[in-house]
Image (spheres, rainbow, N blue to C red):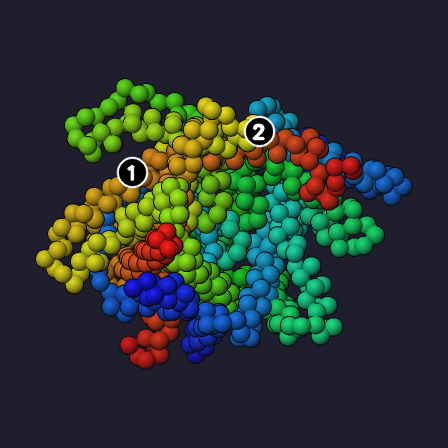
Amino acid sequence: MAGLLDKLLKIDRRWIFFFVALSVTVPILVPLGLPISTTSATQMAFDFVEALEPGDVVLLSFDYGPSSAPENDPMAEGFMRHCLSRDLRVVVCVLYPLGALGLANNVVARIGHEFPNKVYGTDYVNLGYKDGDRAVMRRLGDSIADAFPTDVNGRPIADLPIFHGVRSIRQVKVVFTAATGLIGEWWITLVHAQFGTPVIIGPTAVSAPKYYAYISSGQLAGMLGGMKGAAEYEQLIGKKYPVLGNYYKGTRLFTAVKGMDAQTAIHFVIIVFILIGNVAFFASRLRQGRS
Amino acid sequence: MSGLDLSFGKVALFLCFGLLPIAGFLLGLRAPSIRRQGPIILAFLAGIIPILSIYIPKRFLAHPEMGMSPRLDQYLIIVAGFALPLGIVNVIQNSSRKAIRRETGWPFAVVLLVGLFVMGSFGIYGAWTGEGIGFRVDGTSTPFKWMEENCFKPLQSTIFALLAFFMASAAFRAFRARNAEATILLVAGVLVMMGRVPLLEFIATPFPPLMPAAAAASQWLGKLTEWIMDVPNSAAQSGIIIGAALGAAAMAIRVILGIERSYLGLGKGD
Amino acid sequence: MGDLFGTWLAALLTLAAFSFLYKDNPIYRFAESLFAGVSLGYYVGIVLDQTLKPNLFEPLKTNFGLNWDLMLAGVLGALLYVRYVPRIGWVARYGLAVYVAYYIGVEFTQKIQGEVMPQLARTIRPLNQWSLASVGAFFASPSLVSLLAIVGTYSVLVYFFFSREHGRVMRPISRLGIWFLMISFGAAFGFTVMGRVALLIGRLNFLILDWIYPTLGI
C-alpha cells in the first residue's frame, strides 16, 4: 500500500492531464442534467432587473476576452435576453481591449436575431470599444456621447432614438459588467461611488470571492459568480420566461447550465487527487515517524 | 484663430499640457536637469486636476463642457489609445533582429511578424475604408473579424485553458495539510469545491435510492459554502481591500508630488 | 466554404496549442508565436477603428473649431513613441507623465471613496440583532455576521501592519487574521478551480460540438 501511494505521488503528470480531459469530455458527450441551486447573489441580480420598468435604460459592458468567454459569454447573453424580454433598452459597450469587441459583436448579433421585434438603435445598441477605461467611465458621468461619439459602425449616437432622455450614466438604471480583472471593480468603485448608478457584476470565478465584500457593503446590486452564477441566472430567466426556457432547453449552442455537468465531474476528480496526495503525504510522514 | 472655441478649460489645458512641454523641450536641449523636472511638474498637474474636480465643483474645473477636468478625461481616452500598442515597436525591433541574424528560434519570430502585419493591416484597412472591424452591413465578416474569430479567439482561449491541467497537477502534488493554516486552507477549499456544484448528486447518480439524501446534503453544503463566502471570506477580503487601497492611495500621493519618479525612468538621486 | 475553413483552422490551432500538454514542440511554438503576433495586430485595429478615428480624427475633420485642442492629446500620445528615438527619447517622459499621473490621480479618489470608506462603513453595524430560533438562524444572525466581519477585517489589517514588530497583543490578533485569510484563500482556490476548468470546458465544447460532430454529420 505504501509503495502504491509512493508510485502515485511520482506519477507522470500527463496521466493527470488525461484524467482531467476525460472528466470534462465524458459529460459533454453524455449530459447528466444535474440540478443547480440558486445563490443569494444571483437572486439579487435577477430581482433587481425584474424590478425595472419597461423603457428603462441599462448598460451592458463587455469587460472580458476570449480567455474567459465560457464563463462570461453566458452571463452577458442571459442578461441581454432578460432585459429585452422585459422591454428594457440595452446599451452595449466594451472597455476590455483584448478580444472583447468581437465577443460583443457576436452576442449582439446573435441576440438581435433571437428578438426580431427589437430594433437596433431603438431597443438596443452596440457602442463598440473605447480605450481609456476609467477616463471613459468619468466621461460617461457627464455625457455618453462624449465618450462614445459613434456606435461600433461609426453612426453618430445623437441620431439614435435609444438615447432619448438619456444623456449620461446617471440616467442609466443599472450597469451590468461581465468582467475579468480590474475593469469590473472600477465600475463599482468609480461609477457607482461617484455617480450612484447601481452595478451588477458578472466576474470570472477567479475574481468572484473578492466581490462578496462589495455585496456585504451594499456597493453591488447582485453578482453572477463564474459559470455557476451564469447557470443560475439562465435557470432563473428560463423559469420566468417560457420562451427563454425553451431556447435554453433546445439550443445546440454552449450554455452555462450544460457546462455545469463537466464542472461537477472535474471537481470530483480534483478532490480525489487532493485526497490521494494528502493520504500519501500523511502515510509517508507516519512511516518516517515510526522509523 | 477665429472660429476656435476658446473656452477656459481648453485654453488652460493647452497652456498646461501644450506650452509647458514645449518650453520644457526647448530648455531641456540646453539644461539636462529640466528634462527631469519638466515631466514631474506635468505629472503633478495631470494627477491633481481629476482629484480637485471632485472636491471643488467650480465651473473652470468641473463644468461638463467648459471645465478642465472633463476635457482632460477626453484627452486621456486618446492618449490611452496611443499607449495600448506601445509595445509593438519593441516587439518588431526584437523579432526583426532575431530573424535577420538567424538567432535560435528565428522562424517563430517570422511567424510573429507575419501574424502582426497581417492582422494589423486588416485593422488599418477596416478603419481606413470605413468598413470597420466587425460585421459588415450584410452580416458577413470583415477580414479582421474573420482572423479574430478563427485565429485569435481559439488561440487565446486554448492557451488559457491549458491552465486547468497545470492547476490539477499542482493541486495533486503540492496541496498538503502540512500545518494548521494549510489545513484550514485545504478544508475551506474542498468545502467550497463541493458546495458550489451538485457533487453529492453526481456521486449518487449510479445509486438512485441515495439521491434524496444526496440532494438534502448538497443543499446544506451549498448553504455552508454561501456562509463561508459571505462571512469569513468577505471579512478577509474587506481587510485586503482596505489595506491595498490605502497603500495605493499613499503611492498616488507620492507620484503626484514627484517623490516617486521611477515610472519616468528616474532614480532617487534624479 | 469560408465557415468550414475557418472552423477547421480554429480547431487545428486549438489542437496545436493543446499539444503542449504532451511536450513542448514546434507546432505549439508556431501557435504561440502566431498568437503573439495576431494579438499585437489586433490592438492596432481596435485602437485605430474604435478610438482614434471616432474620438480624434473625425472630430478634428468635422468640427476643427470646437475640437482643435484634441490635437494636443494626439501629440501627447504620439510623444510616447519618441522613447524609441535614441537622442531625444527623454521627450517621451512628458507623454508618460500625463498618462501615468492622470490614472494615479483618478485612482486616489477611487480608492478612498470607492473602497476604503464603504468597506470601513461596513464594519459599523448594530450588535443587538441575534436570532436564537435554531443553529442555522443563529449563524445567519445579522449581528453575528457583523461581529465576524469586524473581527475578521481588523485582524487581517493588523496582520498586514508591518511597520512595527508584532508584540504580545498584536501577535494573537495577527494569527487570527491569518486564519481568516486562509479561509478566504481556500475559498478562492475552490473558485479558481471552477474558473480555470470553465475555460477547458468551453474549448472542448467547441472541439466536440462545433467541429467533430458537424464533421461526422451528427
Image coords of residue C31 (percent x, y): 53, 70
* Residue for badge 1: B227
Residue drawn at the location 49% of the way across and 70% of the way down: C20
Q: Amino acid at mark 1?
A: Trp
- Chain under callout 1: B
Q: Amino acid at mark 2?
A: Ser
Image coords of residue C201 (percent x, y): 36, 62
Same subunit: marks 2 and 1: no
* Residue for badge 2: C163
> Which type of secondary structure does the marked residue at label 2 adopt?
loop
> Which type of secondary structure does the marked residue at label 1 adopt?
helix
Image coords of residue A90 (percent x, y): 39, 47
Side of B44 relative to C128 (left or right): right
The answer to whether residue A216 is visible is yes
Side of C214 relative to A151 (left or right): left
**Vertical placement of A191 versus A291: above or below?**
above
The answer to whether residue C71 is visible is no
**Vertical placement of A183 versus B161: above or below?**
above
**Vertical placement of C40 versus B83: above or below?**
below
Nearest to the observer: residue B176 or residue C79:
B176
Residue drawn at the location 43% of the way across and 36% of the way down: C178
